[in-house]
Amino acid sequence: MTTGKAPRSVDQLSASLHSPIVDGFALTGPSHPPDPAFHAYRQDLADTALAGKVIASHYAEPLARQLTSEAEVMESPSDAGKSVAKLAKGDQFDMLDCTRGWAWGYAGAQRRVGYIRAEAVGGM
């Protein structure tokens, strides 16, 4: 199948990779991604509400869960990490991922993003 375009030479291809214009689209200006502390996205997964705003391998709809016990929201999936919020039993946690004993998502009016121990999440 032919596209009607002449094949690019190695020099043209190399120049286009280092040029701010690639195939007619200008790549200029800084990128301003949302604050990951309050917007749930990682390289591998993002909240569907952020589709079109961030790039991730997969997108998921958060599952609303009620906590069955108190929980610390951690920046990373580790008890040795930094705590960014405390949640009470009965608080809602909007979960996007649950692996290796940690649930990742957000909670509260500010939608604070982080990890909590999976055993604190109800409805599992």
Image (cartoon, grey):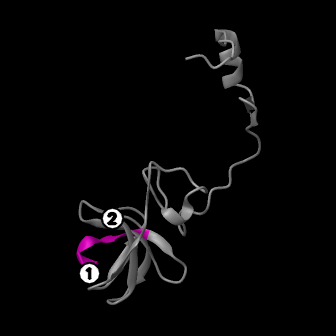
Question: Which comes before the other along the chain, label 1 or label 2?
Answer: 2
Magenta segment range? 114-124
Q: Is residue 51 above or below residue 10?
A: below
x and y percent of residue 3 in the render?
63, 20
Residue at numbered disc 1: 122
Do tag 1 and tag 2 residues touch (Cβ < 8 Å)?
Answer: no
Q: How many marks?
A: 2
Give the quadrant of the C terminus: bottom left
Q: Quadrant of residue 62?
A: bottom left
| Residue 71 in sight | yes
- Horizontally, residue 55 falls left or right of residue 88, namely right
Q: Which mark is residue 45?
A: none
- Horizontally, residue 113 falls left or right of residue 99, namely right
Q: Secondary structure at mark 2?
A: loop
Residue at numbered disc 2: 80
- Horizontally, residue 92 falls left or right of residue 108, namely left
**Camera-side residue: 38 or 62?**
62
The structure residue drawn at horizontal position 73% and vertical position 47%, both measured from the top left corner, is 30
Q: Is residue 102 above or below residue 89?
A: above
| Residue 79 in sight | no
Task: Sort mark 1 into few (<14), some (14-19) or many (20+) by Cα contacts within 10 Å.
Answer: some
For marks 1 and 2, give the CA distance. 24 Å
Disc 1 marks a residue whose amino acid type is Gly
> For residue 25: magenta?
no
x and y percent of residue 31 in the render?
68, 49
The structure residue drawn at horizontal position 26% and vertical position 71%, both measured from the top left corner, is 118
Disc 2 marks a residue whose amino acid type is Ala
**Camera-side residue: 84 or 100?**
100
Give the quadrant of the N terminus: top right
